[in-house]
């Protein structure tokens, strides 16, 4: 009897030791209560003026949302690890003390079993987890494309806005000078309110445009600093000539039908569908009864011992995993439709972006062709006005017409840049290559 007690205590101690040795320890990870300082990023911020390529590299390095999104990879890898593990075997036993009868010792029994169905479903679980892990990679790459595209867009808008601001300020100065002279003429009785009203209205409109653009520029700089993980009002010097992404319109237009092979978001959907295919197969396999197999044995109160194989199984009478099978099939149909819709939309967006960019480039060429004429007229007006051969109203009209034409060019150049950035974001021009993804064909 004492030997049995010692044996049981030894087994319990050994089991407890194995359990503790195989378990991870818990450490709390409290949430922060204050914002993370963004004045200095992980690496020093370069001095300006910054080019578009430098902005792209800094966004990929410092954007807080991208940094957080990259942590998803660890979650996917842990899920992939879990999918490749078999369930722990189950162990059971009992001790039956003698309460009556001729027996002379404790009765006991013990058994150990393993779920064999886990072996059947192992491949499907690993395939699904592998596809889900690759999907995270593709989603992260698409998020990087979006962040870089937004930064490029803000960069182009800020630089174009600064050029537009200089023209608006010059226009405002022209009308301010004209209004000041009209005020003096009014005071001397050489002009009327009727003649000065249009110029006053033009001056107020120019001031309103300058104020609106100043507000817009401030918002854009705040947004770009946020992408760079910096304080909103941190100084940001940008190069004055934004370089447009190199996009071959003819090649994009011709290969738009192949966009499914180049867009990370579409690849992510395809990998998600692959993961769902694996889950659908898994639900089919889970219809088969669970089957636990192992070995068991024991001893009765008269110390007669026995040992032999044991098994247990479920009877597929009521459940048969019918609900999960139906749900997985419905989910697969939903993902199939979503993939087709995204593919169609991506194709249409690429073709539309090419057409819109070509139209903007044609319009810009026409307006640029008009600029030399307005410049000559403005220069001639300035000379004639100084020589007294042109009245002030005609001079202001020709000068403001030249400035308006330049503003129109700046606005169209900004539109072209914005559409080039949008097309580059859709096609991946100058962005992290799709080749950076792991092999998605495996």
Image: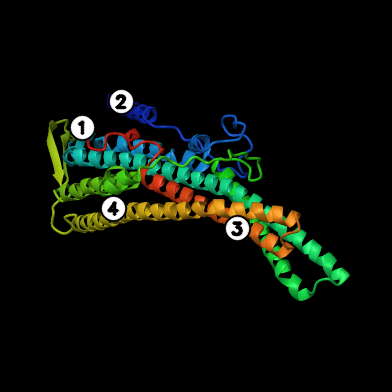
Q: In the drawing, what numbered circle is on residue 404?
A: 3
Q: Is mark 3 on a helix, strand or loop?
A: helix
Residues at badges 2 and 3 in contact (C-beta under 8 Å)? Answer: no
Residue 400 appears left or right of 73: right
Residue 314: give x, y in percent of width and height: 16, 49
Q: In which quarter of the image is residue 398?
A: bottom right
Is residue 168 shown to the viewer in this render? no
The residue that label 1 is drawn on is 104
Is residue 73 shown to the viewer in this render? yes
Residues at badges 4 and 3 in contact (C-beta under 8 Å)? Answer: no
Q: What element carries label 4?
A: helix
Ranked by sequence position, the earlier of labels 2 and 3 is 2
The answer to whether residue 146 is above or below residue 294 is: below
**Residue at image point 66% right, 62% down:** 397
The residue that label 4 is drawn on is 343
Ranked by sequence position, the earlier of labels 2 and 4 is 2
Instruction: Give how far apart the Cα atoms at labels 2 and 4 are.
Output: 74 Å
Q: Quadrant of residue 104?
A: top left
Name the residue nearer the viewer: 326 or 402. Answer: 402
The residue that label 2 is drawn on is 2
């Amino acid at each position: 009897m004492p030997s049995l007690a010692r044996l049981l205590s030894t087994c319990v101690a050994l089991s407890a030791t194995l359990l503790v040795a195989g378990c991870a320890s818990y450490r709390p990870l409290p949430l922060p209560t204050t914002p993370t300082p963004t004045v200095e990023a992980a690496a020093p911020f370069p001095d300006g003026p910054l080019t578009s390529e430098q902005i792209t590299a800094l966004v990929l390095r410092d954007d807080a949302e991208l940094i957080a999104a990259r942590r998803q990879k660890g979650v996917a890898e842990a899920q992939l690890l879990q999918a490749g593990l078999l369930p722990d075997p189950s162990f059971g036993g009992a001790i039956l003390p003698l309460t009556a009868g001729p027996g002379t010792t404790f009765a006991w029994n013990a058994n150990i079993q393993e779920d064999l169905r886990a072996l059947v479903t192992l491949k499907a679980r690993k395939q699904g987890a592998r596809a889900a892990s690759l999907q995270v990679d593709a989603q992260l790459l698409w998020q990087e494309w979006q962040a870089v595209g937004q930064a490029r867009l803000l960069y182009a808008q800020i630089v174009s806005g600064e050029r537009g601001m200089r023209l608006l300020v010059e226009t405002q100065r022209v009308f301010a000078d004209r209004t000041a002279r009209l005020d003096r003429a009014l005071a001397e009785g050489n002009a009327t309110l009727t003649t000065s009203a249009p110029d006053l209205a033009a001056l107020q409109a120019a001031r309103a445009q300058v104020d609106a653009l100043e507000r817009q520029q401030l918002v854009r700089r705040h947004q770009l600093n946020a992408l760079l993980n910096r304080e909103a009002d941190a100084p940001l010097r940008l190069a004055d000539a934004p370089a447009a992404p190199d996009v071959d319109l003819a090649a994009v237009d011709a290969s738009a039908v192949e966009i499914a092979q180049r867009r990370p978001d579409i690849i992510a959907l395809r990998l998600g569908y692959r993961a769902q295919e694996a889950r659908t197969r898994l639900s089919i396999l889970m219809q088969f009864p669970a089957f636990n197999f192992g070995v068991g044995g024991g001893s009765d109160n008269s110390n007669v011992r026995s040992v032999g194989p044991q098994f247990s199984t479920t009877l597929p009478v009521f459940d048969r995993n019918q609900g999960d099978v139906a749900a997985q099939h419905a989910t697969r149909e939903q993902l199939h439709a979503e993939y087709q819709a995204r593919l169609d939309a991506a194709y249409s967006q690429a073709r539309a972006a090419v057409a819109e960019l070509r139209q903007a480039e044609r319009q810009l060429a026409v307006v640029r062709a008009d600029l030399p004429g307005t410049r000559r007229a403005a220069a001639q007006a300035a000379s004639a006005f100084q020589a007294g051969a042109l009245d002030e109203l005609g001079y202001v009209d020709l000068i403001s017409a030249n400035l308006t034409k330049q503003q129109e060019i700046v606005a169209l150049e900004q539109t072209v840049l914005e559409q080039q950035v949008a097309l580059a974001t859709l096609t991946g021009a100058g962005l992290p290559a799709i080749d950076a993804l792991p092999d998605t064909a495996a």
